[in-house]
Image (spheres, rainbow, N blue to C red):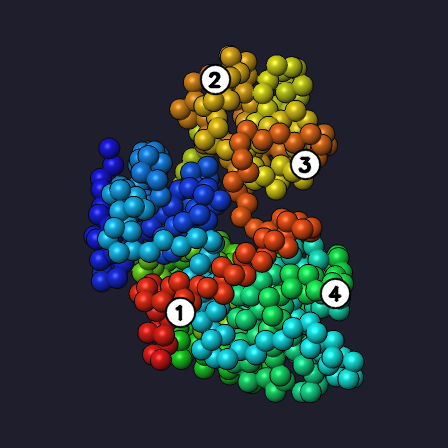
Amino acid sequence: MAQRITAAELLDALQNSDRQLALLDLRSPLERSHGHIAVSAGLPWHDVEQHIADLVPFTSTPIVLASRPELDERGAELLERLGYRDVSVLADGLDGWKSAGGRIYTGTNVRSKTLGEWIEHTFGTPTVDGETVDAWRAAGEDVVFLDSRTPAEYRHHHIPGGHNTGGGAEIAYRAAQVVKNPNTKVVINCQGRTRGIVGAQSLINTGIANLVFSLHNGTPAWEQSGRPLEFGTGSELPAPAAVAQELKDWARRTLAAAGAQVIDLAEAQRYLDDTASVTYLLDVRSPGEFAEGHFTAAVSAPGGQLVQATDEYVAVHKSRLVLADTGDFVRAANTVQWLRYLHDGQLTVVAVDPNNAGADLVRPNRLSIPTPAVPTVSAAELAALDSAQLVDLRSSTQYAAGHLPGSVHARREHLADIVAAAGGAPVVLVGDADFVAEHLVWGLDGDVRVLTGGIEAVSDVLTDADPRHAGEIVDLTGAPDFGPERDAWYEAYFAWELNLLTESEGDPFFDFAAVSGT
């Protein structure tokens, strides 16, 4: 049985200690969204081996598991098997947390979204609805829409004429290419509220001469009002050829005001070499820039998404964060000015120099989880296994987009039952380049094999027809696709989001005013 930590001890460690610790919730995204500790990070039981080394790179870092006690026990056993030496289970789980005075929150990325509401309330971030925009345009005024969502969200659907900026922290970096007249009104839209509010206030904070607004309730409200949408590539703003000196100066002032030091590569490497303290190296540039070249130790964390979903990138409290950006630091500054409200550790920034390919940062002591040696089957051999049960372990979204005919989508918690039901017939687990299926074979009693090369090895025979699921789809928490169910979902979502400031009032983990000194 894993060691226990009481909720009172955990609260004290989080609020009154400089000791680093990771607080993890092992439930599925859907179950976690029904109620969780806001300062925990979600790492589903299904995905532990896939992501634990990025979230908790050192086996000496204390880990506390806080979800369902029986799941936490299994999680502790797995983490200890992987080499983690200080794993505790929260005594009595979430009930214990509530009994000690801790609060439980529904939804996802709760602190980030509450911060967005706090920003609008505190700074008076202007907002505008579609009807007002129509009136401006009817009066001949110039209006530019800058989309603060991810490129994938933009391509799925966007406001006609809106520009794909690449995400929140990119707005100030790229806006000057389409906002050339100080009389142009600028509207920032997202897929709800947070990224629109944060994006608008970030642009305002740079000192731009234009009037800047967030679109009230974002693209969903625009859509629900009957206004048209466009689909596909649209207008994608490239990175600027040059950044204005005024914007560079603003970035330096903003970093200094937030207490974020600019460090050189040598200092950043010393941080990464330090096994006594966890350092995350987070590249806040666009995913495209990251793909073209990045530090070996870096994780792609586009600035807007990092603020929107901090708990998906950072699990260790009191850890150091090093943000990697181009030398103008505009995106790092846009990120740091809000990230300081969400993270309780040191913030620093380091420059990425695309012209110096030899410069690198590495994490020499990162946990390495070897791929287990398990029975495998090749794509060619698979065709001869007529009785095999094919089990796709990728995300439900990936499975829906294309899967092997006859395969079933499943998660770790379904596998024992699937193997038992197979009655001795082969069960073939299917992963991909990002999901190492071999890790999930351990502990299964039966003829379990892994498809060599994953889904990529059979990409020519995939189908989106006849999907089958071993259980409820639990890795999705967002809105349904277009239709009446989507409208109802957003109505409930906006009611939840608009209540966050009231719900979190008095909770010390949401005391953003204390961080700002207001």
At x 29%, y 46%, the residue is: 95
| Three-letter code for the amino acid on which mark 1 is drawn | Arg
Question: Does residue 188 appear in this view?
Answer: no
Residue carrying label 3: 402
Q: Which residue is mark 4?
A: 227
Vertically, is 260 above or below 490? below
**Vertical placement of 248 versus 306: above or below?**
below
Q: CA distance from mark 2 to mark 4?
A: 52 Å
Q: Residues within 10 Å of mark 4 (few under 14, many from 20)?
A: few
Q: Which comes sooner in the sequence, label 1 or label 4?
A: 4
Disc 2 marks which residue? 420
**x%, y% of residue 275?**
30, 53
Looking at the picture, which amino acid does disc 2 mark? Ala
Q: Are marks 1 and 4 in contact (CB under 8 Å)?
A: no
Which residue occupies 63% across, 20% down?
A: 382
Which secondary structure lies at badge 1?
A: loop
Query: Mark 3 to mark 1: distance in Å?
Result: 40 Å
**Left or right: 391, with 77 as reference point:** right
Label 2: state its secondary structure.
helix
Q: Earlier in the sequence, mark 3 or mark 2?
A: 3
Which label belongs to residue 340? Answer: 1
- Alpha carbon separation for disc pair 1 and 2: 49 Å
Q: State the separation of the CA atoms marked 3 and 2.
A: 26 Å
